[in-house]
Amino acid sequence: MLKLRGVSKHFGQTTAIRPLDLEIPAGRTTVLIGPSGCGKSTLLRLMIGLIQPDTGTVSFEDTALTTSNIASLRHRMGYVIQDGGLFPHLTAQENIELMARHLSWDGSRIASRLSELVDLTHFPVDGLERYPVQLSGGQRQRVSLMRALMLDPHVLLLDEPLGSLDPMVRSDLQAELKSIFDTLKKTVVLVTHDMGEAGFFGNQILLLRDGGIVQQGTLAELVTTPSNPFVTRFVNAQRSPLDAFGENAS
């Protein structure tokens, strides 16, 4: 679905992504994880063409992303950012339908697709006419997800979509998102800083550090066969306080 060959990215004197090769398999969920500043969000933005690599190529469905074709290729990509990125002056429905109307979809097609997405995300119909400020954090993320899915994209890219939510809402939405991913069977790339979340969603996990991929595999592989001591330190640092308490208590 996505292929990166020799891709690197710098911002001034800072190396965000060191030259790397990467393939994102179709129909599966790939999770990018790592400490702050490791390059995971930059890598996601390279995949969707929001920024251009300094070296190498990014290809989507065997087509290299270029400045001339990225606008049309993005119609087959859905993108969700941490706080939703909703336009505050538009209602939930207007946010969701924005690109479909921009592409001149007819009204019946828009209405049909909106109805499908409302059912998929369990969004309250009476919330469609509300503005983002009138919605809860979980509802805003559902609207952002519906907007990303409106054009029925081939790949869905999410940058810490649940990071700003309180733990209970986050837990509920994790379960709902997993169900949505399983139902749609789309290619998903998700950025998170939480190893438990990575293991919950990911068919494969990419652990990044200093702009490079340290290890790629399942959560079990990262835990049982770490490629170097950093992997072990990162995994151990993600253990919950309750786990640590339980060990101390015993």
Image: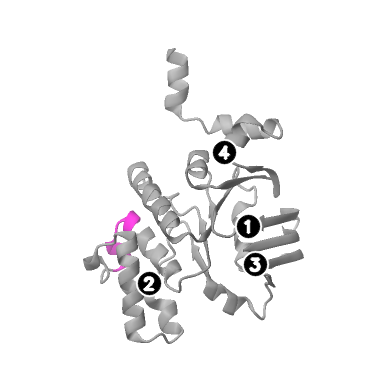
Question: Which numbered tag is attached to residue 51?
Answer: 3
Q: Is residue 157 left or right of residue 212?
A: left
**Quick one: label 4, few (<14), some, or many (20+) residues within 10 Å?**
many
Point out the image quarter for the C terminus: top left
Q: Which residue is mark 4?
A: 219
Does the rendering let one see residue 15? no
Q: Is residue 122 magenta?
A: no
Q: Which of label 4 and label 2 is nearer to you?
A: 4
- Which secondary structure, mark 1? strand
- Mark-to-mark CA distance, 3 and 2: 24 Å
Q: Earlier in the sequence, mark 3 or mark 2?
A: 3
Q: CA distance from mark 4 to mark 2?
A: 34 Å
Q: Amino acid at mark 2?
A: Ile
Amino acid tagged 4: Leu
Q: Quadrant of residue 59?
A: bottom right
Residue that mark 1 sits on: 24
Highlighted range, magenta? 131-139
The residue furthest top is 250
